Image: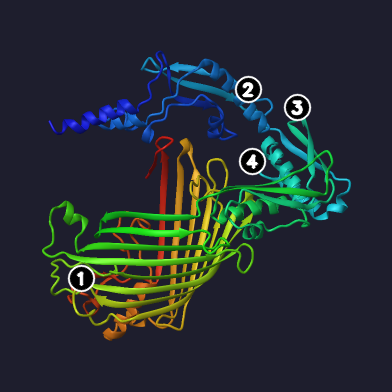
Amino acid sequence: MRPVVPIVLLVVLAACSTRRLPAGSIIVDRVDIQGVEKVEAQAIEEKIATAETKRALWGVLEGTPLLTVVDAMLVEYQTYDPLILERDLERVRRFYRARGFYDTIVRAGRVIREEKGDHVRIEIEVVEGEPVLIESVDLVFDDWTEALLSHVDMRLQMAAFRSSPLEDGEPLPRFDEDRYDELKARMTRALTNRGFAYGKVTGEVTVDVARHRAKVQLVVDKGPACTFGDVEIVGLGEIPEKPVRRALGFKQGDVYSTQRIDDAQFHLATLGVFGSTEVEASLDESRRPKAIPVQVRLEPTKLRTVRAGIGGAIGSRVETHGIVGWEDRNFLGGLRRFTIDARPGLVFFPLQASQVFGLDFPKDVLFVPEAELRMTFKQPGFPEARTNMIVQASTSIYQPRTLPTPQDFDKDVDNVVGYREIDGAFGFERKFRFDFWRGNTLYAAQFIKLQFDDPFSYNLDAAPDGFERVLIPYLETIASWDFRRNRNGKLDAGDPHRGVFAALNAQFAAIGDADDIRLRPELRFYQPVAGGTIVAFKVAAGLLFPFNYGDSIANEGNDFTATARDLQLLSFRGFFSGGPTSNRGYPFRGVGPHAQLPFLSQFGTSNELQSTGGTGLWELSAELRVPLTEAFLGVV
């Protein structure tokens, strides 16, 4: 009877999770829009209310034994309504007209019964016709000499509007209402970014339907040149006012700029102490005063946090770990941030997942303690208003995961090596926000870092020969450029639906045991495809140029002391691949060079393959992120 229990539970769960439809409902299986060639069909589907029923993994689970229960839990039924379909036909017509198709014909939708009597397929037939193309774009700006930079900016935007994008076989760009409205908004920003707070751009479009041509005329009213007036900050609570005003980046009397207002809102959010921020200028269109008052409305979050947790992992090793931490976002006032975290852990060496699930436990198991204590201090607004100074220090003991796991472990004989590590860092970071290319953010940081590692033995008197103390001071530069956006078109690194992310980590080590240059570039792409599915690509590379180590490895000499030193440095500075954050499906650091190194082995035998790391790295991954429901996302 036991096998029946989970099946019954699944059936009950499905019955509880599936939305019950009203009696007599007709389910829409498919919506086909036919005749679409000159626009994206998906864009039309997103505009209409009639939608097809969505099933997990495109319906492959339906009808499959047991898995059909999962399908019933995740299915999102869409029902047919003739009144809604009629309105959708008008929405399709309006969609085409907004994109310059003034003579598009949208024929009545056909409703076709499927084999299941309560299921239908809907077909909407479209005859697109020819699009209206932009013949000319004229500007009326009488007093342009008083706003020369704004005028140049407008002319450049107009030139781009009337010259691109060009579709195949069309000599001129199409007239698109969204592009037209966006042009007027950008031209208005060209004024308001440069002090003309009341600037406006209006327009008139003359369409020759017979010739399929449009003439656009834009009229500019720049208004008076303005400055920022009184800046009022509301909702600070216990947060000090001075660092908040510095983060704003403007003060009373400065030249008015909507760009600076947007930047202020962005940088206030990066302080990390506000749940919401709103910076709003109070414009009086009737009186048009030249000093524009600004109100900053803030909602602070909790400034102090205590966190604690425990967890475990079963994979290439079996471990349990915990975390205890405290954070103060207003440490000693001035929005200084201080964080301290302790992360104790225990590794059951050499136990692995295959042994746990196969009930093939090793003869000896050594309890290997690991621990890390990390402290971070951040001083905002130093040395300038939007730059942060960061000081970090940490100490830890750990077992390096580059070393092999023995076949028959004997804790009284085999030497389990660990490291005592001390790290320190001092540097500066800053975030930038830009408006071009529809907005993007740039992060830049520069650090001086120091790393010291002292090998020891967890179970014997000392680490074996070949393991030496290592001191590595180095400079680290971090830069990233983020163009990722969510489904609403807003910049969002947490839930990207389209866009590009580029990053570079560059290090230069000198003075200590390692002299080298280490580069780690990375590029990510996100693009939505049909049905809300997102294609995500990641391309990463690594280049290491060692100057005072590595020759013994390349020459394959018999100087075991030099080779041991080079390989130990490579374990800290080289590249490794494999694991959940790298090449998925491979063991941690399981991809890359391996070698039998009895002279640098914690167990002193010659048949153990060690991950030695490499001086070069490339990784390429592609994912399909499929929305199963609004709450669940599947990754292939």
Q: Residue furthest left?
A: 363
Q: Which residue is under mark 1?
A: 608
Pointer 3 or 1: first along the chain: 3
Horizontal arrangement in the rendering, residue 551 relative to residue 299 (left or right): left
Query: To which quarter of the image does residue 206 belong?
Result: top right
Q: Which residue is under mark 4?
A: 167
Pointer 4 or 2: first along the chain: 2
Label 2 sits on a secondary structure element that is strand
> Where residue 227 sits: x, y (%)?
79, 53
Q: Residue furthest top?
A: 24
Q: Which residue is under mark 3?
A: 210
45 or 133: nearer the eye? 45
552 or 128: nearer the eye? 552
Cα–Cα gap, marks 3 and 1: 80 Å
Identity of the amino acid at label 4?
Answer: Glu
Q: Is residue 312 visible from the viewing direction of this image?
A: yes
Work out which quarter of the rendered image holds the C terminus and state it. Answer: top left
Q: Neighbour class for label 1 at 10 Å: few (<14), some, many (≥20)?
A: many
Cα–Cα gap, marks 3 and 4: 20 Å
Verify CB contact (< 8 Å) between mark 4 and mark 2. no
Verify CB contact (< 8 Å) between mark 1 and mark 2. no
